[in-house]
Image (cartoon, coloured by chain):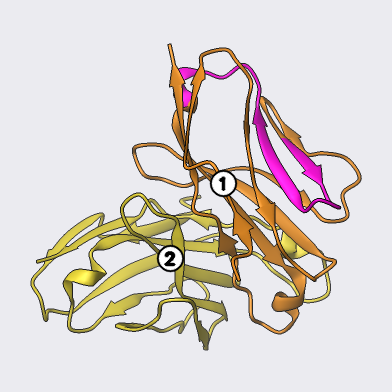
Amino acid sequence: AQKITQTQPGMFVQEKEAVTLDCTYDTSDPSYGLFWYKQPSSGEMIFLIYQGSYDQQNATEGRYSLNFQKARKSANLVISASQLGDSAMYFCAMREALFMKDRDDKIIFGKGTRLHILP
Amino acid sequence: NAGVTQTPKFRILKIGQSMTLQCTQDMNHNYMYWYRQDPGMGLKLIYYSVGAGITDKGEVPNGYNVSRSTTEDFPLRLELAAPSQTSVYFCASSYSMDGDSSYNSPLHFGNGTRLTVT
């Protein structure tokens, strides 16, 4: 069963608007971490933000914030005041502590959302 | 501090040839991974290692082999290259320790190797 679901293959957003990229996940492990990565057209993978399952507050890093709704198993990335340089592919990923204890650390990635910022 | 370094950046192979993709990290991370990314797709785990001398299969291990003789290095070997192995290959590393909350440790990626098999 797919554990990370990103339902938006592509999005077009006007520059300076806020954008929300959706991510839902599935796990039975109470201890896990959720990550977002950015992949620009140049190809490198850039770590943006993470959220731990026990974190009480939503994570923030500059213009990036993570809307973490644990009961709904969603971890949406919010980019405020979007810029042309935000045009990229964005991946959501999950790491489960249970698998780590069994040395079965299979970090799972979603299929990604391609974000286009329009001038 | 170079992070995760992959070589080569680009390579073209003929069907049936073999090659090794090199990956080294200088962050003293114990966990290392190889992913492949097909055009327009997400990342699929090929192999991973939780420490020197220990490797495990990921989602798509067929056609590949790995070794982990040191903490720093995690080479990926392609034997008998096939067109289906045309992809971008990413090496990554992270820190993890049993018993703590290091499931929050992010992966640090290399810049990738673009491989074409013709």
Q: Residues within 10 Å of mark 1 (few under 14, many from 20)?
A: some
Q: Is residue B99 left or right of residue A19?
A: right
- Mark on residue B76? none
Give the quadrant of the C terminus of chain B.
bottom left
The image shows residue B19, relative to residue A49, as above or below, that is: below
Q: Quadrant of residue A31?
A: bottom right
Image chain in yellow: B
Q: Mark 2 — on which chain does it sit?
A: B
Q: Amino acid at mark 2?
A: Tyr
What residue sits right under mark 1 in the picture?
A7
Looking at the rendered structure, whether the residues under marks 2 and 1 are on a common chain is answered as: no
Q: Say whether residue A75 is magenta.
A: yes
Task: Residue B24 in the image: state x and y as whole percent.
Answer: 42, 65
Q: Quadrant of residue B85?
A: bottom left
Q: Amino acid at mark 1?
A: Thr
Distance Cα–Cα, label 2 vs label 1: 22 Å
**Highlighted range, magenta:** A66-85
- Mark on residue B35? 2
Task: Residue B36 in the image: state x and y as whole percent.
Answer: 38, 64
Q: Is residue B80 left or right of residue A21?
A: left
* Observer-nearest of B8 and B103: B103
